[in-house]
Image (spheres, grey):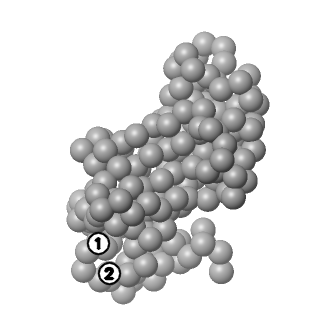
Amino acid sequence: MTRRLAPCLAVAALTAAGCPDGAGPVGAPGPPAVVERVDHIDLHCSPAAMNWDGRPGPDGIGAQVYCYRLAEPLPVTVGGTLELVLYEGKVAEEQLLTVPAAHTWRFPAGELERYLVRNIIGWHYSIPLRWGRDAPQSDVLTLVARHRAPDGQTVQSRPATVLKGG
């Protein structure tokens, strides 16, 4: 079973059976309690850069970040800092530490709540990553999400490839 299918199946099973403390069912009135550390991050983003202002040229990337703890079947909300890092070109996971980032967006815990939304999978952060005047030059981009816990633990998503378009 793929990692992407597992959360969907978990939601279906938990909707019928109930959820363990702290996870909260998708139909719950509010998000689950904030956790400081996570074990896994899933990054979903638009396959191509977005044009939000209606003027020619892309403005940024739409990103959805799902954070998980192994002990809980549904996505969790996080403390610490969430970083989204953009690289020029297609960058393999093993190259991420050696290639300079083109842009980094940092969201401390206090700013994350404004991006918190819920869908069929559960609570996650839906963040428009606008690059403003610092548009990347490459037509292919790589995006990674990182969670930095208050104690320094860092967990990173797999890289996602996005077409910039023009």
Q: Earlier in the sequence, mark 2 or mark 1?
A: 2
Front residue of 138 and 52:
138
Name the residue at 35% across, 59% down: 152
Task: State which quadrant residue 115 falls in.
Answer: top left
Q: Position of residue 150 (x, y in %)?
A: 29, 58
Kind of residue at badge 1:
Gly
Side (left or right) of 117 relative to 113: right
Task: State which quadrant residue 87 falls in.
Answer: top right
Name the residue at 76% across, 31% down: 139
Secondary element under disc 1, as helix, strand or loop, is loop
Q: Check the picture and name the quadrant holding the N terminus.
A: bottom right
Q: Position of residue 34 (x, y in %)?
A: 25, 62
Front residue of 14 and 156:
156
Secondary element under disc 2, as helix, strand or loop, is loop
Front residue of 163 and 11:
163
Examine the rendered structure and indicate whether residue 123 appears above or below residue 113: below
Q: Residue furthest top?
A: 55
**Label of residue 24 in the image:** 1
Taking the image as drawn, is residue 131 in sight? yes
Alpha carbon distance from label 2 to label 1? 6 Å
Name the residue at 75% across, 44% down: 90
Examine the rendered structure and indicate whether residue 73 appears above or below residue 101: below
Name the residue at 55% across, 16% down: 133
In the rendered structure, are the residues bearing label 2 and label 1 in contact, judged by CB atoms less than 8 Å apart?
yes
**Label of residue 19 in the image:** 2
Examine the rendered structure and indicate whether residue 45 appears above or below residue 147: above
Q: Check the picture and name the quadrant holding the C terminus.
A: top right
